[in-house]
Structure formats: C-alpha cells, structure tokens
Image: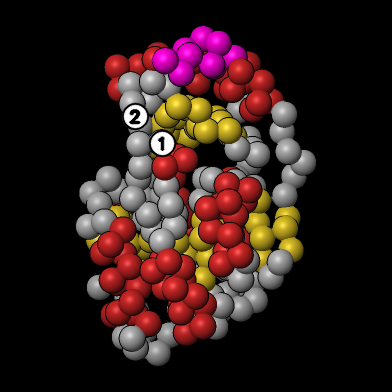
Amino acid sequence: MTPGARLSLLLDFDGTLVPIARTPEAVSVSDDLRRLIATALERLDTRVAIISGRSIEQLDALWGRSLWPVTVAASHGLELRHEGRLRAPPPASIFALLARETEARFGASRGVVLELKSYGLGLHYRLAPRLADAMHDWAKECAQEHDLVIQAGDQVFELRLPGADKGDAVRAIMQLHPFAESVPVYIGDDLTDIAAIAAARECGGGGIAVGERIAAHADAILADPAAVHDHISKLLEGAPDGFIT
C-alpha cells in the first residue's frame, strides 16, 4: 500500500462486523460499532461501504438511521444505495413461495431456519447440520426449476437471482464519487467474499480475511469481528499505509 493513499473501506457484515449468530435474527449492532463506522465515515471522507448478502430492508432494521450515510450494496449487489438513492430491481415474489414450500417440506421443528430476503432465500441448517445434504439437494431442485443461483455459505445455502455478486458490487462502488480513484480494502469472512477481494485487487487494493475460511484468497488475516474493529480503529488513528499488513 502506497503511503498516503486515499483508502476506501469495503466491509462484509455477518462474520466480519458482527459475529455469526445461531439465527440471522439473533444478530445485533452495538453502539460501539455504530460509533466506529461513524468515525470511519468522517475520517475517510465517506468512503465506507457495507456489502452484504442481506437485503437493504434487513440491514436498515438492524442499523436504523446510523446506516443512512453509508454506501450499501445489499442482496449480493442487486441493491445499491448511495447518497440516499436506491438502485434495485422489482422485488421477486418467487422467494416467498419457495419459503412456504421449504417450510412445508422441512418444518421449523427440524431445525431449518429460513431467511427471506427481497431477492433471495437463505436455507440455514446451523441448528440441524444432519440436514446439510438434504438442504443442498432441495436448493438444487429449486434453482433448476426457477432459474436461480445457489450461493453456499457458512452452514447455509442461499437461493438468489442471477446476475450479481459481491465482486460486481465492489466494481460498481469504485466507480462512484468519492470512491473513484481511491484504493479499496475489502474485509470479509465467507465464500461470497472471495469475488469481492478479487475485485478489490483489480481496482488496485486488496483484501483481508476474517478467520481461516477464505484466508488463501486474502492478503492478511484477522481472527474475528473484534479484531476487525481494532484494525479499523488503528487505521483511523493515522496509519493508513499499514492497513493491510
């Protein structure tokens, strides 16, 4: 990293800024995290983005008004909100239908947790790891029938619309003011973040893995979300040229 470079901070959410929880609804955003992101926005001239598989609606429910100044790419980049303007396709009703069909087949009593999004459906089997193969087979059946994409994650198969991933989201953000002509650093923990790290490198930056899952694809590794918070704090204290290392 060139000393004095203008940095952009691009962040995954689950597993990166907040720990993975037993269910998606169990996640919370602490006041300390809100203050950290607010400080980053100020110090980096608003060059802070959150890139998540969650929908804008889900993220807004967790963050409230503190998320409004942040550039957000949600639903793996299908939704992009920047400077208060949202770009997104019409909501897809197919995922509500698939949620009902999945519930009828597996039932909540078997431990499957469904995460319904605007443009996707997460099939979480963290509470029922014995169902991993069955969930994968069901996801493949749904994807084939409805022309959807399967995105594997940490004990989840997500059905989503084709046409975007987190790498595409990084490229789109880096064309926007004030991100353009800055150096992106992406931080993420899961398989969906590999494409984002590759895109950050294409744009002259790099990536940091949280944990070992995608460490082989990153320039550096942080242990957990608490370490991510500490690393961002050190950046904001005035050592941007050491951000990746």
Q: Residue at x 42, y 29 (%)?
A: 124
Q: Which residue is mark 1?
A: 23
Residue reaching furthest top?
105
Q: Let me know if residue 185 appears in the view.
A: no
Q: Residues within 10 Å of mark 2 (few under 14, many from 20)?
A: some
User: Which structural element holds mark 2?
Assistant: loop
Q: Which of the two residues, 179 or 201, is positioned nearer the viewer here?
A: 179
Q: Residue at x 33, y 86 (%)?
A: 237
Q: Is residue 155 above or below residue 54?
A: above
Q: Nearer the viewer, mark 1 or mark 2?
A: 1
Q: Residue 122 placed where, x, y %?
A: 50, 32
Is 161 situated left or right of 50 in this image?
right
Q: Is residue 36 above or below residue 150?
A: below
| Residue extent of the magenta highlight | 101-109
Q: Is residue 174 above or below residue 105?
A: below
User: Which structural element holds mark 1?
Assistant: loop
Q: Which of the two residues, 1 or 187, is positioned nearer the viewer here?
A: 187
Dividing the image into 4 quarters, which one contains the C terminus? bottom left
Is 113 situated left or right of 78 in this image?
left
Q: Residues within 10 Å of mark 1 (few under 14, many from 20)?
A: some
For the stretch drawn in magenta, what is the main secondary structure?
A: helix
Q: Which residue is mark 2?
A: 126
Which disc number belongs to residue 174? none
Q: Which callout, 1 or 2, points at the residue further toward the start of the chain?
A: 1
Amino acid at pointer 1: Thr
Amino acid at pointer 2: Arg
Q: Is residue 119 above or below residue 207?
A: above
**Membership of 153 in magenta stretch:** no
Q: Residue 27 placed where, x, y %?
A: 42, 47
**Distance of mark 1 from mark 2, alpha carbons?**
8 Å
Do the residues under discs 1 and 2 have CB atoms within 8 angstroms? yes
Dividing the image into 4 quarters, which one contains the N terminus? bottom left
